[in-house]
Image (tube, rainbow, N blue to C red):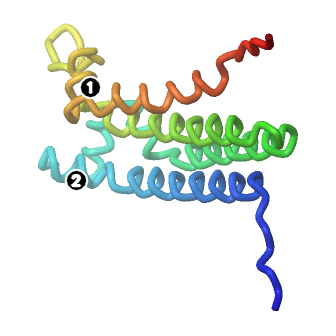
Amino acid sequence: MTTPPKFLPTQVASILLLASAAAQSFVCVLIAWIVPPAFHSIYRLKSLHEAWDLMPPITRFASENSWLIVIALGAVCLGSLLALRRFPERTIHCMTVGLCAEGFVTWLAMFCFCFDGFTGPMSLHHGPEFELPQFISFGAGVFPVTLLLVVAPIIAALWPRVNSKP
């Protein structure tokens, strides 16, 4: 009878970081693919070209260049894996910062995709602009809350510890 192989905590953390980056990359690319037809349908436009023209520049950029989001997620994952290898005794900290950094990249991508929901009305003097109240109220406040949930663990993991020895 053989015993199953034991996984080290760093191996489990590495698998989790890779799986998370892959899943978030897939979701971001899928949403980038869905956004233009969504604009076309929501605003009842005649063509998809009109939807591209109507999109805010940041949304258009994120939709056209979703591969940059995938590269950013890959870079964060690679950096986290290198940190795990360099500091195996700090596996939990490296994994926490890595997962939250991946979450922050995804948060930024979703911010770009939903930017139209953060803008106020258009006037004769200016086009629609970012408005903080719209940002806070969009989706029942999902963006400020998730930003806090992504940033708080990073701060906690990187906060300097004071060891008090008697």
User: Residue 127, position in %: x, y?
Assistant: 24, 18
Q: Of helix, strand and loop, which one carries label 2?
A: loop
Disc 2 to disc 1: CB gap under 8 Å: no
Q: Which residue is mark 1?
A: 118
Is disc 1 placed on a helix, strand or loop?
Answer: helix
Mark 1 belongs to which amino acid? Phe
Q: Nearer the viewer, residue 12 or 28?
A: 12
What residue did someone put label 2 on?
A: 47
The vertical placement of 158 against 89, above or below, is above
Q: Earlier in the sequence, mark 2 or mark 1?
A: 2
Locate the C terminus and report the quarter of the image it occupies: top right
Q: Residue furthest bottom?
A: 1
View extreme (front): residue: 166
Q: Nearer the viewer, residue 56 or 116?
A: 116
Q: Quadrant of residue 140?
A: top left
Q: Position of residue 129 (x, y in %)?
A: 27, 17
